[in-house]
Image (cartoon, helix red, strand yellow):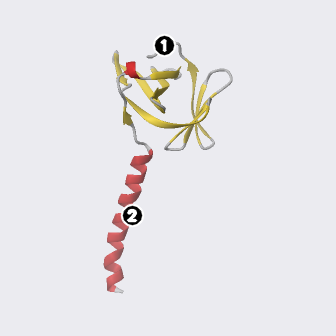
Amino acid sequence: MRYKACLLPALTGLMLQASITAAQNRFESVVLPPESERRVVGTWRLAPPAPCTRSIEMVGSNYYMVARCVEDGKLRFGDVGTPLRRITDRLFVASNDVTYVVANDGKLIARNGGDLIFEAEPHAGFRP
């Protein structure tokens, strides 16, 4: 019995670390090459007050969701992307199970399961 009591904290710690590592991997971002080496599939502007856009971009045959925001007049983000799996021309899935759908009207709709995360309007510019 004493032997089991000693193992329990160690096993619990290992399980917790494995869970944390798995969660970190689910939200992994990748540093992307310069914008000149990417192909933009589409860009959408988030609703105010957030001066932000989301773009689906390709590097080689890989797809990424890229966030760009303006804070204090300076562009933030844009150099990293969340890997996406392309399911169809209008459906993409991130490693954290967020789905991105390009609707018939051009809006980008992001959902986590049945929960709406955001809807964004098509944006002609690359930046917010």
Tell me if I can see residue 45 in this picture.
no
At 48% from the left and 26% from the top, the residue drawn is 57
Q: Quadrant of residue 91?
A: top right
- On screen, residue 35 versus residue 117, left or right, reads left
In the structure shown, which secondary structural element does the residue marked by tag 1 occupy?
loop
**Mark 1 Cα-neighbour bin, 10 Å: few <14, some 14–19, many ≥20:** few
Q: Which mark is residue 125?
A: 1
**Mark 2 Cα-neighbour bin, 10 Å: few <14, some 14–19, many ≥20:** few
- On screen, residue 93 versus residue 24, left or right, reads right
Q: Locate residue 21, reporting x and y percent.
A: 37, 53
At 67% from the left and 20% from the top, the residue drawn is 105
Q: Locate residue 128, reporting x and y percent.
A: 45, 17
In the structure shown, which secondary structural element does the residue marked by tag 2 occupy?
helix
Tell me if I can see residue 102 in this picture.
yes
Q: Residue furthest right?
A: 104
Give the position of the N terminus as an image quadrant. Answer: bottom left
Q: Nearer the viewer, residue 52 or 127?
A: 127
At 36% from the left and 81% from the top, the residue drawn is 4
Name the residue carrying label 2.
15
What's the residue type where badge 1 is placed? Gly
What's the residue type where badge 2 is placed? Met
> How many numbered discs, if any?
2
